Amino acid sequence: MDFIFSFFIIGGIIVAALNGRIDIILDAAVSSAEGAVQRSINLIGIVSLWLGIARVAEKSGLIAILSKAIAPVFRRLFPSIPKDHPALGCILMNLSANMLGFGNAATPFGLKAMQELQTLNDTPDTASDAMCTFLAINTSSVTIVPATIIALRTSAGSKNPTEVVAAILFATTCSTLAAVIFDYIFRFFSRRKI
Amino acid sequence: MIAEALGASVSWFIPALIFVVFFHAHLKGVRVFEEFVEGAKEGFFMAIKLIPYLVGIYVAIGIFRQSGAIDVIVKLFSPVLRIIKAPTEALFVSIVRSISGPAALGLMMEIFDAHGPDSFIGRLASTMVGSTDTTFYILAVYFGSVGIKKARYSPIVGLLADFTSFVASVYIVRKMFL
């Protein structure tokens, strides 16, 4: 993460300097910082709402029921998470919200899942295997209903806004498979030194 | 037809989910309001804790994007593009996609305006934007929210998956629409 962070900032400044547009750097930095806070403020409501609902579901035992139901599939993907652990339920909720195209609902469950995974992590500053797998699947996101894309295509006057759904399904399946496979390979070769 | 049916069931999904959660909790005798507030409190602090991480990632991405550094990367990769027969613009979309969601949507709409949503590049952009997520943003926010400093191989896996999606998108859109 440190490397990428420095790469973006240093690379950006060098390129801007070479292009003779060094004046935009300060502008970009300040407006991005403001945008980030704006975004976080908007997140407060959504995250509070969904974690409130998630807490109710957890207390009633609904998340435990879900975790148990998907345990057979998830045990292969996440061998380090104990059976019936609430992390599984949160991961399921996050991934299914993502699949259906509800980015807003997905984020709170994802954050909650990370919190649960962190309780299982014995090196709190370093990502655990389960976290890496979870984020690999999450960032490659299996999308079944690309609602936003369809809406934007419609508003741009497409004759057939949904014609890309099959293509998206194909590409997203490929990328998620690739994510799972690469994750497995890297996990295998990077046995953590503790 | 199928898309419409999917769309209808999607608009039912969230209300149904919330209904099931509260109905089940009520049956189990959970103190619903108290627990909701407790969870919401957790969410509040989580969102506040995220602010510094979001500021960091937004600033880095903002500088990188507005400086034109992305164009440099696109140029570096243009020999590879020629091999897989992808338009340069497509790689640009793909790179932007993995660092900023709103920017990728904006770029896609720009392409729709310039070439039309039913053009080759319009379809390709739709497919690429629809098939992956904002890798760097998600990694920063999710790891940041629990204080993880070392992401290990996560960024590499994310990028490899994004690249796979790029290649797969080019392949399938050529196959289906050309």
Image (spheres, grey):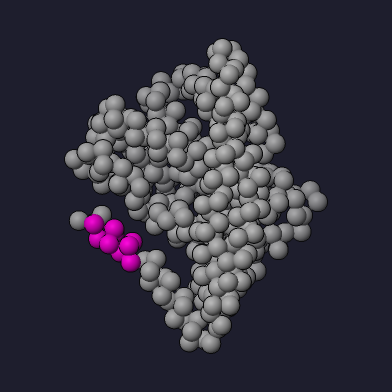
Identify the residue at horizontal 35%, vertical 40% (top origin): B127
Q: Position of residue A76 (x, y in %)?
A: 57, 61
Quadrant assignment for the C terminus of chain B: top left
| Residue B9: in magenta span | yes
Q: On the rendered structure, is A31 left or right of A125?
A: left
Direction from residue A13 to residue B116 in the image, left or right: left
The stretch in magenta equals B4-12
Instruction: Give percent across and percent down for residue A187.
Output: 65, 48
Q: Is residue A25 above or below residue A167?
A: above
| Residue A88 in view here | no
Please state the horizontal and vertical placement of residue A116, each as a whole percent of the image. 65, 63
What secondary structure is the magenta-colored segment mainly?
helix
In the figure, B160 relative to A173: above or below?
Answer: above
- Compared to residue A69, the image places residue A132 above or below, namely above
- Quarter of the rendering occupied by the N terminus of chain B: bottom left
Query: Residue A173: percent from the left, percent from the top?
Result: 42, 48
Q: Residue at x 64, y 59 (%)?
A: B45
For residue B105, say whether it is visible: yes
Report the side of A106 relative to A145 (left or right).
right
Q: What residue is rendered at 42% in x and 76% in y?
A: B20
Of B127 and A26, nearer the camera is: A26
